[in-house]
């Protein structure tokens, strides 16, 4: 990661694209290695402990509707470099084809897509999305090193193609399984730039303790069933 390009700390809007400020903790080799160690140990333990649950979900997805168990999607990683990520399939098999027909219902301003009561989601999908269980296969991406436990959520490559320079700044670090957006009103944020501001705030203030706080808050949100 290049830490020589630390620019203006005041990023007020998508028109202000002059740069991004990093927390000084990013320049600490020790802290970055501890963060990676937390990723490896945390993802490996969770995959092991949750393996019976992962198997049950996989069987239910297979039995509940036609289509593959996993939804494979190309997302943008650090620096915008694409990689293959995996989720439990929570939508019908033709969801990507139907998406264009629902574009006029999009509730998110910006490159992302979100609608309440998305008709492409299966009955089982609504349940596993409520508790973010569909995201669990991404622990494999964390173990591989494509992702980290805490960091800006990775956008679809098709979304990243429409990012403004301001929005691309969130990809200055490795994307994560959870983030500030995940624990700060993800269901209330309808402007993608507001989401980006939270990601930039994370990059600006990152510390190992902040990661721990976000992970604890994420566990609380998962138990509350706040996902959609």
Image (spheres, rainbow, N blue to C red):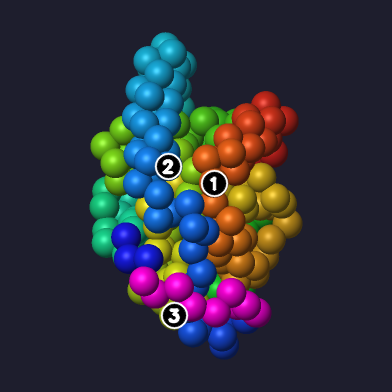
Label 1 near label 3: C-beta < 8 Å? no
x, y (%) of residue 142? 35, 37
**Residue 5, horizontal then vertical, whole percent:** 39, 74
The quadrant in which residue 77 appears is: bottom left
What residue would you read off at disc 1? 207
What is the span of residues highlighted in magenta in the rendered image? 4-12
Picture layout, residue 157 above or below residue 186 = below
- Residue where numbered disc 3 is placed: 165
> Whole-Å distance between the Cαs marked 2 and 1?
8 Å
- Tell me where residue 154 sits by quadrant: bottom left
Whole-number angstrom distance, CA of label 3 to CA of label 1: 25 Å
Residue 9 shown in magenta = yes
The answer to whether mark 2 and mark 1 are in CB contact below 8 A is yes
Taking depth in this image into account, of 80 and 54 the one nearest to the observer is 80
What's the mark number on residue 31?
2
Mark 1: secondary structure: loop
Distance of mark 2 from mark 3, alpha carbons?
A: 28 Å
């Amino acid at each position: 990661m290049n830490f020589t390009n630390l620019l203006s700390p005041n990023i007020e809007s998508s028109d202000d694209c002059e740069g991004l400020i990093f927390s000084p903790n990013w320049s600490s080799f020790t802290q970055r290695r501890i963060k990676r160690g937390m990723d490896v140990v945390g993802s490996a333990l969770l995959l092991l402990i949750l393996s019976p649950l992962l198997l049950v979900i996989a069987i239910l997805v297979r039995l509940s509707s036609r289509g593959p168990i996993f939804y494979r999607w190309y997302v943008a990683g650090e620096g915008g470099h694409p990689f293959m990520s995996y989720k439990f399939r929570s939508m019908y098999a033709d969801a990507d084809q139907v998406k264009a027909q629902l574009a006029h219902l999009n509730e998110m301003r910006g490159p992302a897509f979100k609608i309440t009561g998305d008709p492409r989601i299966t009955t089982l999908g609504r349940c596993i999305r409520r508790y973010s269980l569909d995201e669990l296969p991404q622990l494999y991406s964390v173990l591989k090193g494509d992702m980290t436990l805490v960091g800006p959520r990775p956008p679809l490559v098709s979304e990243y193609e429409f990012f403004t320079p301001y929005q691309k700044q969130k990809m200055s670090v490795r994307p994560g399984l959870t983030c500030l957006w995940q624990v700060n009103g993800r269901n209330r944020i309808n402007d993608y730039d507001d989401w980006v501001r939270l990601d930039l705030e994370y990059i600006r203030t990152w510390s190992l303790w902040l990661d721990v706080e976000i992970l604890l808050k994420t566990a609380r949100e998962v138990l509350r069933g706040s996902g959609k």
